Image: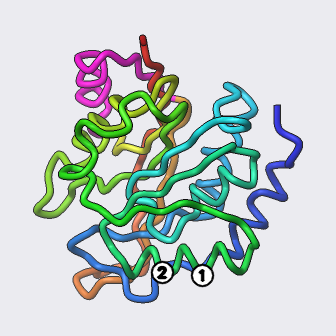
Amino acid sequence: MTSLQLRKLEEYLQQIDGFDKPKIKLEQYTTSAHIASRMLYTAQSQFDDIEGCAVADFGCGCGVLSLGSQMLGASHVVGFDVDSDALNILYRNCTDLDLFIESIQCDIFQYLPGKFEKYFDTVIMNPPFGTKKNAGTDIKFLEIAIKTASSAVYSLHKTSTRNYVLSKATQLGAKGTVIAELRYDLPRIYKFHKKDSVDIQVDFIRFELNS
């Protein structure tokens, strides 16, 4: 269980600064406080996968999932991101909230294979969906997450890819369970966007590891 109420967690996460100039190449979208709080609260209240645990956040961006994990009592949180600008915002958010998150700037596909294997209890992430020129990026994130986590991985994936994602997880030695189906609101932040916002159906999935 968690001592921090869901409502308070969401309020705290609403204070976190998002991207100043999001980069389309990296598919940078800030995970909303509404979605992030429910991901993290579920991971803790239903599965006890945050409090007292070593947690990793891949593609951590400005740190909403990392900081939320710390708020829920994680023993150690490490955020990984390739973008130094995003990590500068994460550092600013840490300072504003008086919380500490260890961050590593790296390309996880190059840096992590062979490192941190089964080191983290839990990996929680909102990976790029691979909707542009990076098809399959979310699966690549998932592969590394399963290798570095010892207990569970929590991740968001497009509902339209559900069968493929669950099948791939089984091949990788993890059992995927869809915890919730969410509407992920993508705001109009890039020039190519024609609408003010678009709702994408997204699965929130828990991957239980067999190790």
Q: Is residue 186 above or below residue 174?
A: below
Find disc 1 in the rendering and name its residue: 92
Residue kind at label 1, given as amino acid type: Arg
Q: Quadrant of the C terminus?
A: top left
Q: Is residue 130 above or below residue 162?
A: below
Residue 41 percent location from the top left of the image: 71, 42
180 or 41: nearer the eye? 41
Residue 13 image-quadrant placement: bottom right
Residue 45 percent location from the top left of the image: 75, 32
Colouring mode (rainbow / by chain / secondary structure / one colour): rainbow
Residue 97 image-quadrant placement: bottom right
115 or 63: nearer the eye? 115
Picture residue at 52% right of the left edge, 46% below the top: 182
Furthest toward the front, the residue is 115
The 10 Å Cα crowd at callout 1, few under 14, some 14 to 19, many 20 or more, is: some
Mark 1 touches mark 2? (CB < 8 Å): yes
Furthest toward the top, the residue is 210
Element at label 2? helix
Residue kind at label 2, given as amino acid type: Asn
Q: Which residues are magenta?
A: 160-178
